[in-house]
Image (cartoon, rainbow, N blue to C red):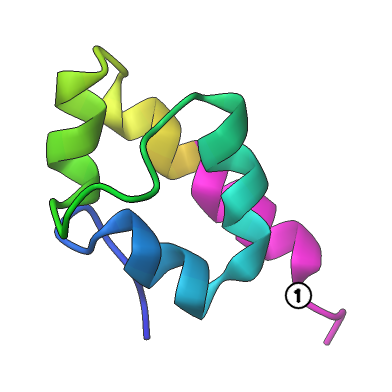
Amino acid sequence: MNCDLHDSIPDWIVEHPETAAVFAELNLDISCGGKSLEYVCLQAARNVDDVLQRLRETIEKQRPPS
C-alpha cells in the first residue's frame, strides 16, 4: 500500500511502522480518530508537504538496498 495524504496516521503506522517516530517527533496525534494525514497536519499547523516528505524519506531509509 502506498500511503498518501488521504490515509489516516494509524494506516501509515500499520503499513510503515518506522513512521511512528516521525509522528511522535512532530507531535501529531496518532489516534486521530480516522482523520486523514492532511487533516491532522492542518489542525496542527504543520506544512503538509514537509510532513509527507519526511515520512517518505524515513520509509526510503528503511528499505533494503536493491
Residue 60 place in picture, x, y as percent: 68, 62
Residue at the spot of label 1: 63
Residue 19 falls left or right of residue 30: right
- Residue 21 higher or lower than 64, as above or below: above
Question: Residue 42: where, in percent of width, then height?
Answer: 16, 24
Quarter of the image holding residue 59?
bottom right
**Residue 51 among those drawn in magenta:** no
Q: Residue at x 27, y 61 (%)?
A: 4
Asked if residue 30 lies left or right of residue 23, the reply is: left
Task: Point out residue 3 in the picture as x, y percentages from the top left corner.
Answer: 33, 69
Taking the view exactly as shown, the residue that stands out farthest to the right is: 65
Residue 57, magenta (yes or no) = yes
14 horizontally vs 9: left or right: right
Residue type (three-letter) at the residue carrying disc 1: Arg
Residue 25 screen position, x and y as percent: 62, 27
The vertical placement of 45 against 5, above or below, is above
Question: Quadrant of the rendered structure where residue 24 is?
Answer: top right
| Local secondary structure at mark 1 | loop
- Looking at the rendered image, the quarter that the N terminus falls into is bottom left
Q: Is residue 14 above or below residue 17?
A: below
User: Is residue 9 positioned above or below 7 on the image?
Assistant: above
In magenta, the rendered stretch is: 54-66
| Quadrant of the frame with the C terminus | bottom right
Could you classify mark 1 by the number of other residues whose Cα lies within 10 Å: few (under 14), some (14-19), or many (20 or more)? few
Name the residue located 16 percent from the left edge and 22 percent from the top edge: 43
Residue at the image point whose x is 18% and y is 41% from the top = 38
Indicate left or right for 46 with 40 as reference: right
Number of numbered discs: 1
